[in-house]
């Protein structure tokens, strides 16, 4: 609490509670607004395949996702692919052969 002296508070408890309550309501009202999305999804259209993908190699790193609920994507730099697990284990693989 901010005070001007040791015995007299600068703001009353009632004023602080009212101010915090008004701020909380303003934040909740901003989060609850349901306007139209800025970018609506486009309708899917059919297309003809022009290529296909084949897996050349497959490797696992540590515990993989483990308990994580978010994807950890590998990254490629030149001829090296880097991958990590949720515990921070990072592995580097040759992009062509998959060898460590």
Image (cartoon, helix red, strand yellow):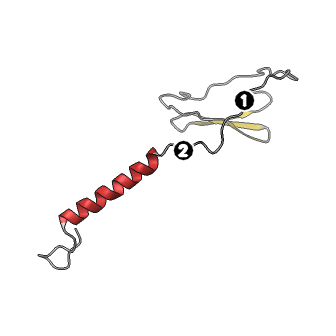
Side of 24 where 4 appears, left or right: left
Circle 2 sits in a helix, a strand or a loop, which is it? loop
Q: Are marks 1 and 2 in contact (CB under 8 Å)?
A: no
Q: Quadrant of residue 17?
A: bottom left
Relative to 47, residue 93 above or below: below
Residue drawn at x 35%, y 52% as measured from the top left:
25
The residue at which mark 2 appears reads as: 35
Quadrant the N terminus occupies:
bottom left
**Label 2 neighbourhood size at 10 Å, few (<14), some (14-19), many (20+)?**
few
Q: Quadrant of residue 42?
A: top right
Quadrant the C terminus occupies:
top right
On the image, the x and y values in percent for residue 30 come to 45, 51
Q: Nearer the viewer, residue 14 or 89?
A: 14
Q: Which mark is residue 81?
A: none
Relative to 54, residue 11 above or below: below
Q: CA distance from mark 1 to mark 2?
A: 21 Å
The residue at which mark 1 appears reads as: 43
Residue furthest bottom as drawn: 5
Q: Quadrant of residue 78?
A: top right
On the image, the x and y values in percent for residue 20 come to 30, 59
Residue furthest left as drawn: 7
Sequence-first disc among 1 and 2 = 2
Side of 2 where 79 appears, left or right: right
Residue drawn at x 22%, y 71% as measured from the top left:
11
Front of the two marks 1 and 2: 2
Circle 1 sits in a helix, a strand or a loop, which is it? loop
Relative to 38, residue 57 above or below: above
On the image, the x and y values in percent for residue 49 come to 85, 21
Q: Nearer the viewer, residue 65 or 23?
A: 23
Side of 25 where 70 appears, left or right: right
Residue drawn at x 58%, y 42% as measured from the top left:
36
Residue drawn at x 83%, y 21% as measured from the top left:
52
């Amino acid at each position: 609490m901010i005070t001007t002296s040791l015995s007299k508070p600068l703001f009353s408890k009632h004023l602080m509670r009212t101010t915090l309550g008004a701020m909380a309501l303003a934040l909740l009202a901003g989060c609850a607004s349901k306007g139209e999305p800025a970018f609506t999804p486009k309708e899917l259209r059919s297309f003809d395949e022009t290529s296909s993908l084949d897996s050349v190699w497959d490797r696992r790193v540590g515990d993989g996702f483990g308990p994580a609920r978010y994807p950890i994507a590998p990254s490629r730099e030149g001829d090296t692919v880097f991958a990590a697990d949720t515990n921070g284990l990072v592995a580097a693989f040759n992009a062509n052969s998959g060898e460590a």
